[in-house]
Amino acid sequence: MKDVNVLMVGVGGYGVILASDGMAEIGMVNGYDVKKTDSLGMAQRGGSVVSHVRWGKKVYSPMIKKGEVDFLLAFEELEAARWASYLSPKGAAIVADSVVIPVSSVKGDIPYPKWDKIKAILSQYSDKIYLVPAARIAREANNPRAVNMAMLGFLSAFLELPAEAWTDTMRRKLPEKFMKSSIDAFLKARAEAEAAIQAKEHKR
Amino acid sequence: MALGAYHAGIAVATAYPGTPSTEILENIARMDGVYAEWSINEKVALEVGMGASYAGVRTLVSMKHVGLNVAADPFFAASTTGVVGGLVVISCDDPGEHSSQGEQDNRHFARFAKVPMIEPTNSQEAYDMMGLAFDISEKFDTPVLYRSTTRISHTKTVVDVTGERKAATNKASFKRWPEKFVMVPSNARVRRVSMEERVAKLQEYVEQFHFNEMIIADRKLGVISNGVAYQYAREVFKNASHLKLTTLYPLPVNLIKKFAAQVEKLIVVEELDPYIENEVRQLGIAIEGKKFIPIIGELNPEIVESGAAKAGLLKSTASTAAKAEPPRLPARRPQLCAGCPHVATEYALRKLGVRTQGSGVELSKSDIIVTSDIGCYTLGVYPPLAALDTCACMGASIGQALGLEKAGVSNKVVAVIGDSTFMHSGITGLIDVVYNQGTTTVIILDNNTTAMTGHQGHPGTGISARGEKTTAVDIEALVRGMGIKDVNVVNAFDLKSIEATIKKCVANPAPSVIIVRGACPLATKKKGKPLAVDADVCSGCLDCMKIGCPAITMSADGLAFIDAEACGGCGVCSQICPNDAIAEAGR
């Protein structure tokens, strides 16, 4: 049973909390000690959202130490850069190719950084960086809102639980209306992650 | 905490919403067999709680840390009278001010009011110790303060909740007992003595409280901690000996002495004030804490670790080694939502009166001073709206406005307050304006909900905590009844009439009220038809972006662009556009 520290980051209103709740539940059902905590601040919509999820044999702190995040699961590119310093040198950044431009950079002094710049920031902390076409995967699964399920699917390929451990809980928890499309998005993203991991191994 | 109280057999639960305490009552309101209410404010919530306790039933009252300031009067009174049915008051503190106007350590309240205090270190204890809190309350004839913090309240952990609901302990009945319930000085003096006797008895009791736990490992270092800081201490000082404290008032003095005697060096890891540290030092025991643990803000394992490394208690590890931070990135500030009913009013205030910007700059004569209050609308302080001058505590906007006026400031003053905050503690301020012949204009932003904390009902909404229909307080009739003659109701999305009404009221030498009415779209889940910018007509002046709407951005060619998915369809931007370039999409 390996300890897993996941930092999920994104923008309010895009399903980060639902994803971290789901991951906490799946860890618990499969026998891990689990803690998860969110930082929402005053954000209803549009603010930064951060969720810490920890699986382990025994978890004390709900918050992950800087430099000890195994997986930075970013639902938005800028937010990935903002939290990059939390990554462990052995950790991986998994970033949805989604851009939400904050008001402050529309007319403000700092422009929204391009992906190359964000990638350069991330690579100061870890060389494992995955850009996930989460919106495309969700669309192809016929549920544009299933971006969070696609992100969980991509992440799941790196963890020791089999796909069924995830989909069983999804079947129990998700509303009928979104179940099939959510599981489709999850499995499709998991398959893409497996391919991406193999490609990286192959390069070495 | 909610389930723990339910299993402890509570019959009554009261609260006023406030982060991070809101979810407690929201959950209890869904449970059968408990009367649950959103009270008008924390003071009333606790007074209702005292009444229920006097009737002999177990009662839970919950609030955020600053709520206990509002409820301080009945809190001290309840300490004096004691209880009949168990009375537990939950205070959810917010170290780091994630969602608060101030940071305060409510452990001091327990000592101040001589009320026992319990504080869990995780969700399991939050559940397990709640029943004990009620037992303590009844056994020692006292309210119990149950403290949580953001990182306990907003953390999910695996919890064993195999308990079952105790039948609500007693049937409600009131027995006359003036020596206990009627605090005239002659009775209060007698109760005062019993308060001290109670503390002495509690002092003995907490020594045996089994959630206070001593873990003896490496004796070179002993770490005392409480609340979520205990989790950080266990994670950072893996091999040290630990003393976990869950009874923070009174502290288990003998247990602390026993622990101190077994370790070579003693430190304390606690969030906010040196509460434990000072108490332990007073026992004549050498201890360190705030020398390396910050007094301000929320802790986390990394802060504790780097503090310990600096103090030489730990070797530097990979995570304590200084690491380059990412470069400065565009901030993502919280902002008013697309379609928010507060936007037009804040824009009007900015345009009509909050024109001189910058700290310390003299106002021009025609500027209006805008005192503001606690709620979503406080976000209007950020650019581009930048339409507010003050925000202090619940209801303060109105008294502050009167004070500015009576001090002799020559600028006109407008107070801005939300409907829920007005109910909470704006009413008394407005009566003070009327009574003392003020001329202030008070704008009540009536979005028919308590939006910031997640859409709870309040007396103006006519919906109870359980979602049942109740009597809605009529704000117009209420303010007329106070003696305000100039009462105006305007549509929250009609910029022109908002501006005209503000101008009219500010010129009136009598006090006036403007009720700006428009429901919060996040509560109603209703959206208007999305608007779009006609790129052929748009001049690129970007005036529409002055309302700070998150749906409006700039296109690659420098024109305004509306994200149809995000647009709430409120139409305020189309009323600002000097070129009439914004209309319903598809037209």
Image (cartoon, rainbow, N blue to C red):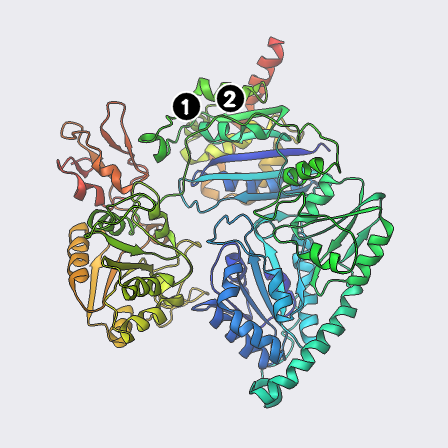
Q: Quadrant of the N terminus of chain B?
A: bottom right
Residue depicted at x 16% and y 65%:
B508
What type is the residue that disc 2 sits on?
Ile
- Between residue B7 and residue B226, name the one nearer to us: B226
Residue B195 higher or lower than B164, as above or below: below
The answer to whether A91 appears left or right of B13 in the picture is right
Residues at discs 2 and 1 in contact (Cβ within 8 Å) = yes
- Subunit of mark 1? A
Kindly state the secondary structure of the residue where label 1 is placed.
Answer: loop
Please say if B259 is above or below B187: above
Query: Regarding mark 2 in the picture, which secondary structure is present there?
Result: helix
Q: In the drawing, does residue B440 fall left or right of residue B118? A: left
Q: Which residue is mark 1?
A: A113
Q: Is residue A164 above or below residue B284?
A: above
Q: Callout 1, which amino acid? A: Pro
Mark 2 to mark 1 CA distance (whole Å): 10 Å
Q: Earlier in the sequence, mark 2 or mark 1?
A: 1
Q: Which residue is mark 2?
A: A121
Q: Position of residue B522 (x, y in %)?
A: 36, 50
**In the foreground, B66 or B402:** B402
Query: Who is closer to the viewer here, B243 or B2?
Result: B243
User: Which residue shows up at 42% across the image and 46% down it?
Assistant: A44
Q: Give the image quarter of residue B510.
A: bottom left
Residue situated furthest top in the rendering: A203
Disc 1 crowd, CA 10 A, few/some/many (<14, 14-19, 20+):
some
Closer-to-camera residue (B34/B149): B149
